[in-house]
Image: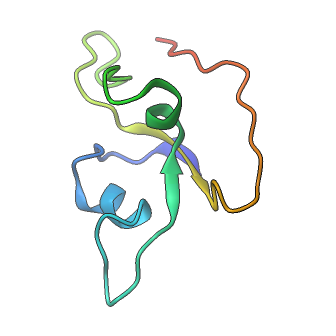
Amino acid sequence: LVGDLNGTPHEAVYGFLTGREQWNGVRGDMVDLWTRWHGEAESGNTFFAWDPHKRIDLMLLRNFGHGSEVQVGNMTLFG
């Protein structure tokens, strides 16, 4: 899932998608690729383009680490 989710990693929609929070007993199982690749130290902020202070553009991958192999060659922030 790649897109502008209009929500930061601290909000409920992100928490649900990544399994941190549940809704009606259901949890997501996606992994945030930016955090996986860069760790928590790099913000990856994308919003506002002229003064980025929030990360709302996300790349989430489902079933990461469940027998699947993903190789990311490069992840660069443009803008």
Q: Does 22 appear above or below 77?
A: below
Residue at the extreme bottom of the image, as rendered: 24
Residue at horizontal 22 percent and vertical 21 percent from the top = 53
Query: Which quarter of the picture shows residue 8?
Result: top left
Which residue is at 63% across, 54% downward? 64
Q: Decide if residue 30 is on the left or right side of residue 63.
A: left
Q: Is residue 34 above or below residue 53?
A: below
The structure residue drawn at horizontal position 57% and vertical position 15%, both measured from the top left corner, is 76
State which quadrant residue 20 falls in: bottom left
The image shows residue 67 at horizontal and vertical percentages of 75, 60
Question: In front here: 79 or 20?
Answer: 20
Q: How is the image coloured?
A: rainbow
Circle count = 0
Viewer-proximal residue among 7 and 25 = 25
Q: Say left or right for 27 vs 1.
A: left
Q: Position of residue 40 (x, y in %)?
A: 33, 30
x, y (%) of residue 48? 28, 21
Residue 66 placement (x, y as % from top left) = 68, 62
**Quadrant position of residue 24:** bottom left
